[in-house]
Image (cartoon, grey):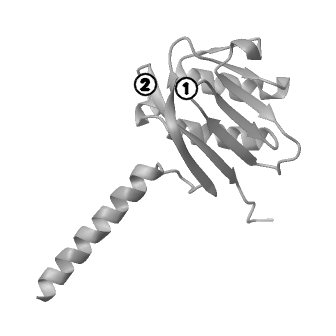
Amino acid sequence: MRMRRILVLLISICCIVQMLSAEQPMLIPVCRSYTAQQGSFVLSEKSCIAYADEALRPVAEYLASMLHIGVAHSATNAQIMLNINPLLAAEEYELSVDAEKVTITGGDYGGIFCGVTTLLQLLPSEVYSGSLNLPQEIACCTILDRIFNIGG
């Protein structure tokens, strides 16, 4: 009887873990807020990145190099947009993925960079080895997070 209870407990834990992983991807560090939405954004060779502030050019170029896509000179042509919002705190960001575009809005450059690293985690691990094949689907979601400076 004891063995049966242990088996039921293990199966229950596995089911709960599976349900949670289906809802929210494994992100490191765990984000403050994740809201899943219907649909997906298709990242393709034709996708491009635009940035609202010249100071964001290095992070835009970094993201473009990781995804093997271009950087646009106009936001109207871009499917991935990087924006600064001074109302957000330092290193705070919002990552919004809908069927048409991806928007990363940060309180500063650090917030944008944190949002970019989170976006990369939504893709297969091949993105880190430079062997990501496009097109790739990214589930629609909204992620809010802020990196806290614990050291002072």
* In the foreground, 118 or 138: 138
Identified at 67% across, 22% down, the residue is 61
Query: For the view shown, which residue lies furthest in the front direction?
Result: 38
- Determine which residue is flagged by label 1: 66
Q: Secondary structure at mark 1?
A: helix
Q: Position of residue 129 (x, y in %)?
A: 44, 30
Query: For the view shown, which residue lies furthest in the right direction?
Result: 86
Residue 98 falls in which quadrant of the image? top right
Report the amino acid beneath label 1. Answer: Met
Q: Position of residue 62 (x, y in %)?
A: 64, 26
Report crowding for label 2: few under 14, some 14 to 19, many 20 or more residues within 10 A (C-alpha): some
- Determine which residue is flagged by label 2: 132
> In this rendering, is residue 70 above or below 86?
above
Q: Position of residue 150 (x, y in %)?
A: 73, 65
Q: Are marks 1 and 2 in contact (CB under 8 Å)?
A: yes
* In the foreground, 22 or 121: 22
Identified at 41% across, 21% down, the residue is 133
Query: For the view shown, which residue lies furthest in the bottom direction?
Result: 1
